């Protein structure tokens, strides 16, 4: 039973990961989530900001998963946004890219 459930669990995780998108919600942060609405709701809850403070007049957009970003502050290596999602997605929204 356990042998059969492990591949299925892995398949579910891969299927879920394929549905995750990354949304640039303001000038600084991009959130990984299933939808823009989920990303915005999670961001406001996480930061404690209201919609006006969090998003002001910024027009949110989806970030291409193949976009290359700096891996860390040293700016020596670039990785794709997809690699960030793949490594850090735990079934919950999170800030995938931040310029602060």
Image (cartoon, rainbow, N blue to C red):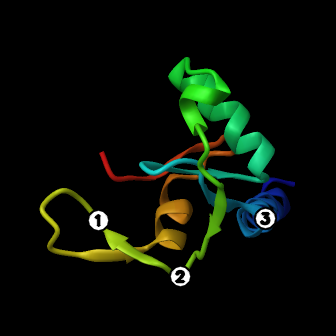
User: Which numbered disc flags the more N-terminal residue, 3 or 1?
Assistant: 3
In front here: 51 or 93? 51
The residue indicated by pointer 3 is: 19
User: Which numbered disc flags the more N-terminal residue, 1 or 2?
Assistant: 2
Residue lying at the far front of the rendered structure: 57
Hey, which quadrant is residue 91 in on the image?
Answer: top right
Q: CA distance from mark 1 to mark 2?
A: 14 Å
The local secondary structure at tag 3 comes to helix
The local secondary structure at tag 2 comes to loop
The residue indicated by pointer 2 is: 66
Residue lying at the far bottom of the rendered structure: 66
In front here: 83 or 55? 55
The residue indicated by pointer 1 is: 71
In front here: 40 or 78? 40
Q: CA distance from mark 3 to mark 1?
A: 23 Å
Quarter of the image for the C terminus: give it.
top left
Picture residue at 73% right of the left edge, 59% below the top: 13
User: Which numbered disc flags the more N-terminal residue, 2 or 3?
Assistant: 3
What numbered label is drawn on residue 57?
none
Q: Is residue 32 left or right of residue 67?
A: right
Picture residue at 79% right of the left edge, 52% below the top: 35
Residue 56 image point, x, y percent? 58, 37
Q: Is residue 60 left or right of residue 98?
A: right
Q: CA distance from mark 2 to mark 3?
A: 15 Å
Q: Are marks 1 and 2 in contact (CB under 8 Å)?
A: no
Q: Nearer the viewer, mark 2 or mark 3?
A: 2
In the image, residue 48 sits, relative to residue 92, either above or below, namely above
């Amino acid at each position: 039973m356990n042998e059969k459930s492990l591949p299925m669990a892995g398949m579910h995780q891969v299927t879920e990961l394929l549905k995750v998108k990354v949304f640039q919600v303001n000038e600084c942060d991009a959130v990984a989530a299933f939808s823009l609405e989920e990303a915005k709701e999670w961001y406001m809850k996480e930061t404690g900001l209201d919609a006006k403070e969090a998003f002001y007049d910024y027009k949110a957009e989806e970030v291409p998963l193949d976009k290359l970003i700096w891996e860390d502050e040293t700016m020596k290596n670039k990785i794709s946004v997809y690699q960030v999602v793949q490594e850090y997605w735990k079934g919950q929204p999170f800030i995938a890219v931040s310029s602060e």
